[in-house]
Structure formats: structure tokens, C-alpha cells
Amino acid sequence: MIFISNTISLNDHEVDINAIRAQGAGGQNVNKVSSAIHLRFDIKASSLSDSNKQLLLESKDSRISKEGVLIIKAQQFRTQEKNKSDAFERLQQFVIKATYVSKTRRPSKPSKNARRKRMDQKTQRGRKKSLRGKVDF
């Protein structure tokens, strides 16, 4: 089982992991060792709820193919184990970020007491300014 959050978890067979050769500089190690990880997660065939699947598919992420498969390539580290854990962590972050629904904002109103205080302060300021006028003797 792959635990994403308290409410979301995935079965191991839903994630396909392949070891491939990493790209870029690295000399002999890169040329002969398959240390990079290609993680494929089929969103449509997963055991997630329909609402979570919809949220994942609607996210504007370039790693999701037209068929609804999320592809994560991890090749940052030298060892296969570290790249595998990095790929799982990135999958977890992606699912959490895509399924997070922010709370709807309810507009707040000032209380009656706050409105009354504001009006009292305005009248006091007005009186003070009216006293600043020219003095007639």
C-alpha cells in the first residue's frame, strides 16, 4: 500500500515502476547503470474516488498524458533506491496538491458595536475639525 494522506491510499499494483538509464553527465556510471526511475500511474484505472480522479485529470500538468497516465521520471540521485523514493514522494505531493479543495470564503460583516464606535469616532473628529476654524471676537 502507498499512503498518500489519511484518507487516500493506493495499491502497489496501480503504480508501474521501470528502471532506466539516466540522462546527462555522469561518466561511466550513467552509461552502465540503470539508476533512473520511470513511474507510471494510470489515473482512470486507479482505486481513487471519482471526484479525486476528476480533480487529478483536470489539473493542468504536462506530466499527464492524453490517456490519463501520470508519468514521473526521477533521475536526480545516483542510486535506484533514492530515485524510487523521490518518485513516490513526487507522486504523493502531486495527488495531495491536486485533490486539495480550498474553503469557500464567506464575506464577513462588522458588528453593530463596531459600526456604532466608528460613527462615534467620525462625529468626534468632525467636531474637533470644526473647532479649528477662525475665531471671532
Image (cartoon, helix red, strand yellow):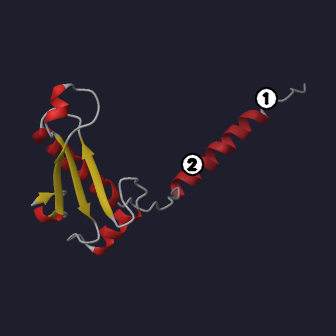
Name the amino acid type tagged 1: Arg
Horizontal arrangement in the rendering, residue 103 relative to residue 96 (left or right): right
Q: Which residue is mark 2?
A: 117
Q: Which residue is mark 1?
A: 132
| Snapshot quadrant of residue 127 | top right
Does dot 1 land on a helix, a strand or a loop? Answer: loop
| Snapshot quadrant of residue 100 | bottom left
Q: Nearer the viewer, residue 25 or 124?
A: 25
Quadrant of the drawing holding the N terminus: bottom left
Task: Say few, some or many: other residues with alpha carbon within 10 Å of mark 1 (under 14 / 14 to 19 / 20 or more).
Answer: few
Q: Residue 118 at what x, y percent from top left? A: 60, 47
Does dot 2 land on a helix, a strand or a loop? Answer: helix
Please tell me which residue is depicted at 79% across the width and 29% down the height of the picture. 132
Horizontal arrangement in the rendering, residue 131 relative to residue 115 (left or right): right
Please tell me which residue is depicted at 39% across the width and 64% down the height of the picture. 66
Please tell me which residue is depicted at 15% across the width and 40% down the height of the picture. 34
Q: Residue 13 at what x, y percent from top left? A: 12, 65
Query: What whole-number distance in Å separates the C-alpha atoms at marks 1 and 2?
Result: 23 Å
* Residue 34 shows up from this direction: yes
* Residue 6 shows up from this direction: no
Q: Residue furthest bottom?
A: 50
State whether residue 136 is above or below residue 84: above
Quadrant of the drawing holding the C terminus: top right
Name the amino acid type tagged 2: Lys
Which of the two discs, 1 and 2, labels the residue nearer the N terminus? 2
